[in-house]
Image (spheres, helix red, strand yellow):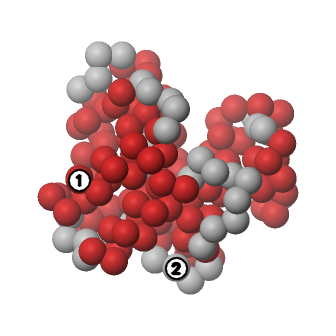
Amino acid sequence: MNHDAEIIRTYIFETLGAQYDQTFAKEGLEHLIAVGQIAAFLALKQNLNPALAMIAGYLHDIAFYTSHYHPGHAKKSAQAAQEILPKITSLNAADIVQITTAIAKHSDKEVTDDHFSEILKDADVISHAVADGIKALKPVEKERLQKYI
């Protein structure tokens, strides 16, 4: 695993581990790790940087799992990542912009964005499909999933 991805993985374990609601924290850890791993795999298949995709997956819902606040969580998670990444990783500014842009866009599944952002959206959908079942997905998520099944 890439060193910066390992740093972010440790960060989410420590941050969510400090939550008062350990059931919610466990759910968050499982989801963030799964999305990170799926995103890395999808990035590999598309010749994009798997470490950056993994980091985006690890942080894509960080604001939701640290504040329990759902509306606007994608943009809030992007803002949190913008603060976190320069402090604890060696990522350059362009990599941070790529990651935070994908995080900010990940909830907008109806829109097609750049390839990197699409990877994060698809990884999120795949994670939800595996954890909750395909029937629990919204129609737009089911449509997105079709390219993989």
**Mark 1 or 2, nearer chain start:** 2
Q: Quadrant of residue 39?
A: bottom right
Residue found at x 61% / y 74%:
115
What residue sits right under mark 1 in the picture? 83
Q: Quarter of the image containing the C terminus?
A: bottom right
Vertical arrangement, residue 89 with respect to residue 92, above or below: above
Vertical arrangement, residue 143 with respect to residue 39, above or below: above
Side of 100 where 115 appears, left or right: right
- Mark 1 residue type: Glu
* Residue 77 visible to an observer of this rendering: yes
Q: Badge 2 local density, few (<14 within 10 Å), some, or many (20+)?
A: some
Q: Quadrant of residue 119?
A: bottom right
> Which mark identifies residue 13?
none
- Mark 2 residue type: Leu
Residue found at x 36% / y 19%:
22
What residue sits right under mark 2 in the picture? 48
For mark 1, give the secondary structure: helix
The x, y position of residue 137, in whole percent, is 76, 37
User: Are discs 1 and 2 less than 8 Å apart at CB?
Assistant: no
Side of 28 where 46 appears, left or right: right
Could you tell me how far apart the alpha carbons at marks 1 and 2 are, in whole angstroms? 24 Å
